[in-house]
Image (tube, grey):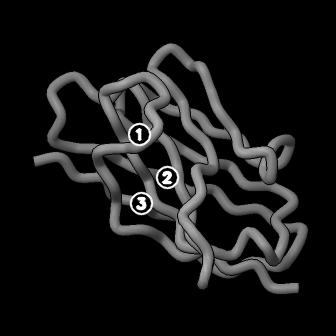
Amino acid sequence: QVQLVESGGGLVQAGGSLRLSCAESGSIFGFNTMGWYRQAPGKQRELVAGITKGGSTYYADSVKGRFTISRDNAKNTVYLQMNSLKPEDTAVYYCVADQRILPPRYTYWGQGTQVTVSS
């Protein structure tokens, strides 16, 4: 059974940084694409960033230049380094994974980790 376990969320002041981690277990060879979604109160879920095994990346316009996604294929772990955080980045962040390359929707989801940015 596939599990995605996030860690690293918390409370930070605007302008600060956080690093999210997501460890995947249960897959045989790992997933071709891993990424991060977020959902703020009253808003739809938004794909924040995605990364393939080969290192191709996708970023939402709202986080380009501030967030960096990376992965360690040997550890089946994906990271999201978030810098210059803004109050509007406050959301629950979900780790996602899929065997397809940068798919429109992701098959596997973690439980989520709260990120709160205070002004």
| Local secondary structure at mark 2 | strand
Q: Does the rendering let one see residue 42?
A: yes
Q: CA distance from mark 3 to mark 2?
A: 6 Å
Give the answer, above or below, for where 51 lies relative to 68. Answer: above
Asked whether the viewer can see residue 9, the reply is no
Distance in Å between CA atoms under marks 2 and 1:
7 Å
| Amino acid found under the numbered disc labelled 2 | Ser
Mark 1, other Cα within 10 Å: few <14 / some 14–19 / many ≥20: some
Residue 34 pos. (x, y %): 44, 37
Residue behind mark 3:
6
Q: Secondary structure at mark 3?
A: strand
Quarter of the image with the C terminus in it = bottom right
Q: Quadrant of residue 20?
A: bottom right
Identity of the residue drawn at 51% across and 32% down: 71
Sequence order check, earlier mark of 3 and 2: 3
Earlier-in-chain disc, 3 versus 1: 3
- CB of mark 3 within 8 Å of CB of mark 2? yes
The three-letter code of the residue at mark 3 reads: Glu
Q: Quick check: marks 2 and 1 in contact, CB under 8 Å? A: yes
The residue wearing badge 1 is 77
